[in-house]
Amino acid sequence: MNPDNVEGSGIPLDDFHVIGLDHRTCPDPIREALFVADEELPGFLETLRQAGFREAMVMSTCDRVEVRAIHDGESGGDPSAKVAEALAAPTALAAGRITPALYHHTGIAALTHLFRVSASLESQVVGEPQVLGQVRASHRMAASAGMIASRLDPLLHASYATARRVRSQTSIAEGPTSLAAAAIRVARSIHGDLAACRLAILGVDDIALMLGARFKEAGLADIVIADRSPRRAEAAARDLAAHVGEISTRGKALAASEIVLCATGDGRYSIDEDMVRSALRARRRKPVFILDLAIPADVDPAVERIDDAFLYDLEDLERLAAEGRSGRGAAIADAERIVEQDVAAFLGGIAARDAAPLIIELREAIERERQAVLRERPSASADEATRLLARRILHRPSEALRELASGAKLDPETEALVRALLLPPDPSEGDTGEF
């Protein structure tokens, strides 16, 4: 498929924009400052409306802040710059500092990105299940704010269908499941029954929340969440029915918890050897399972030397889950193919809908000729009436072809089109009797 040809054929995608930043394009301190809490979404969407976005939704998670919108350019200005200004407005950051971190997709690239996000191909842990629910929740809130209409709605629903197909037809979801299973297996080997354990999540990101949800399903009920951004911590705590703690008191959380997930990712060790030794003294040497999810690491590697402190990172979990990794690459490749197929099918459906007015016009023209034959020859037999109708229908196309041929303008593409229209249908496909 040639994107330029598709975009140039009148398919209404050139005004569809996806603008945002994620864990790969933007440092965490900036991303957390730009987090848009649920209660802030109506005001943020209104800002986008006033900036010329006719339809818009914003997906704001631990790892991603992304606007999907319809902006036709009639109001002027760069949509990316407008999103940067809207994100910067409630913060102390300048829009110019945000703009370099933004990615900006339009048209088919934006549609493909949307499908990939919904299918969890753009997540830190590919296949994690939370993202589709996050997209749906953002969709609902934007619809409640009156910012979803006939343009965005079908794009979003098409992405949901692709996500469902990816999850049902590939094993992509087994990756996150196996990581969580490995973490739970380690926790149980250290602590036994998880129902008696407390989990501390220090630094909110999507992997930490996914694992927190799996620990909760495994029977752990007591969870505390702390983050540099109180808004992110509060939003995450609501989702997990957890308590909110203070990131500045992480030493106390470490002392009070059997399992600790670290995901601050601020480029320095937020948990060091002295802090862990102090926590273990307060715990009377009861062991602690520390899972460092951050890149770069949150936990000083020296912690590994401490008895009763069990330090793991994502690579350790992946090694434990290695039995499921052999098919992981194939599952991701299968998911990629499904996304590619569904994007092409969606675009083909739009192109087919673009042909609908011409098809209707053609049917109406033939019906007019049929009615004219019946009026002029009311007593004609069926055989005679069909011959007359065929001559009338073919008269103008025949004259047009003769004119093209006489002017040496009958090119191979036109000949191929005419022959395609005249070929009898394949009997295996069935003839509906309809145009």
Image: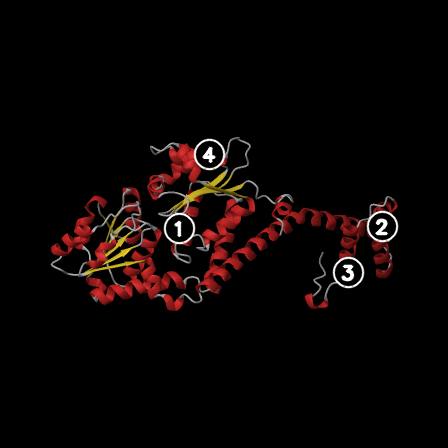
Residue 245 - label = none
Where is residue 184 shown, x and y percent of the image?
28, 64
Q: According to the image, label 1 marks what residue? A: 134
367 horizontally vs 53: left or right: right
Q: CA distance from mark 2 to mark 1?
A: 57 Å
Q: Amino acid at mark 4?
A: Ala
Q: Secondary structure at mark 2?
A: helix
In the picture of the structure, the residue carrying the numbered disc 4 is: 81
| Marks 2 and 3, how far apart at CA | 17 Å
**Observer-nearest residue: 78 or 164?**
78
Residue designated by label 2? 398
Residue that label 3 marks: 423
User: Image quadrant for the C terminus?
Assistant: bottom right
Give the SS element for disc 3: loop
Mark 3: few/some/many CA within 10 Å (<14, 14-19, 20+): few
Amino acid bearing label 1: Gln
Earlier-in-chain disc, 3 versus 1: 1
Q: Amino acid at mark 2?
A: Ser
CA separation, marks 4 and 3? 53 Å
**Foreground tag (4 vs 3):** 4
Q: Can residue 368 be spotted in the picture? A: yes
Q: Residue furthest top?
A: 76
Dot placed on the residue nearer the N-terminal end, 2 or 3:
2
First in sequence, mark 4 or 3: give its number. Answer: 4
